[in-house]
Amino acid sequence: MVKLGIIGMSEGNAHPYSWSAIINGCYSAEEIDQMGYPAVTSYLKANEDTLGVSGAKVTCVWTQEKKISESLAKTAKIETIANSLEEMVGMVDAVILARDDAKNHVDMAKPFIDADVPIFIDKPLAITVEDLQYFSAQSSNGKFIMSCSSMRYSNECRIVKQELASLGNLELATAVGKKDWNKYGVHLLEALFSLLDDPKPISVKHVGQEGKDIVSIKFENGLLATVHLFMDIAPTFQVSLFGQKGWRSIEIKNSYSMFRDNIIEFVRSVKERKPRLWFKKTEAIIKTLIAATESLEKQGETVYL
């Protein structure tokens, strides 16, 4: 049995609740609703027959507030509340850092990386060059670091991935979503990159504005892609592919399925003692994310990777 620790939480991110419930196979709808996440309750209830991840259990939790830790422990029947990150190190086999505030990722991950405890870090891994360089160096030194958006494992994208050959040579890919670039742009980049077998990005150009992000990406294979993140549109995650022989449009909606598959891949990785997701793939996505911000700050100048 893989004993997992879970670290939470950041504002507006319900992953500590949903992921703990998915792994441990139980949840308190009342507790989750009180925390303001009724949508999480809805998809957990709809998938009760598949809750629980074989061979793994969240046994320890830490958050910045005792009250939140107690709520999480109650929700997913987590046995132990750690008093600090350092205390958690000796209690678990692996850790899920389920906070999406990237500015805190290095400090929170470091105790586990230093102690050789496998860690999964919620998206985005980093939003600065310096933080990405830290994680890249640690990964190169053999440290077990895995990070991605769960959209890498979306069923909707995988269904279309089976049909890519029928589209002919791809000329254009587009992705559209809601909210801010740093926290949500990574979702669309992950879906796009994984759908296309992680092509190498060579340049990034931001042609929109803050809150109305439009990012143009050129890949080594010649494919062009645009990613659109708007704060004030209706909630959506969409990816469209246009080839010389056909096209497909994808609406990504099944959060539960992608979360579960992501967790299973991490647990499998821990059991196999190495990340099943190659760190270089994550690195390319985060470099693209950061480059778009740099381009915006430089009034739309092209950034070469």
Image (cartoon, rainbow, N blue to C red):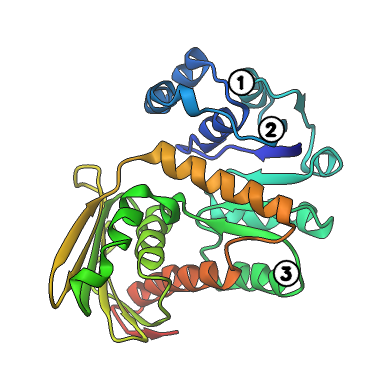
Q: Which residue is mark 3?
A: 138
Task: Say left or right for 116 vs 69.
Answer: right
Say if residue 105 shows up in the picture: yes
* Amino acid type at image mark 3: Gln
Q: Tell me which numbered mark, 1 or 2, is placed earlier along the sequence.
A: 2
* Amino acid type at image mark 1: Ser
Q: Looking at the image, which residue is at 37% across and 74% down?
A: 297
Q: Looking at the image, which residue is at 50% across and 45% down?
A: 261
- Of marks 2 and 3, the one in the foreground: 2
* Amino acid type at image mark 2: Val
Crowd rating for badge 2 (residues with CA inside 10 Å; few <14, some 14–19, many 20+): many
Helix, strand or loop at mark 2:
strand
Q: Are marks 1 and 2 in contact (CB under 8 Å)?
A: no
Q: Which residue is mark 2?
A: 58
Q: Are marks 2 and 3 in contact (CB under 8 Å)?
A: no
Q: Which residue is mark 1?
A: 71
> Residue 54: x, y in percent?
64, 35
Q: Tell me which numbered mark, 1 or 3, is placed earlier along the sequence.
A: 1
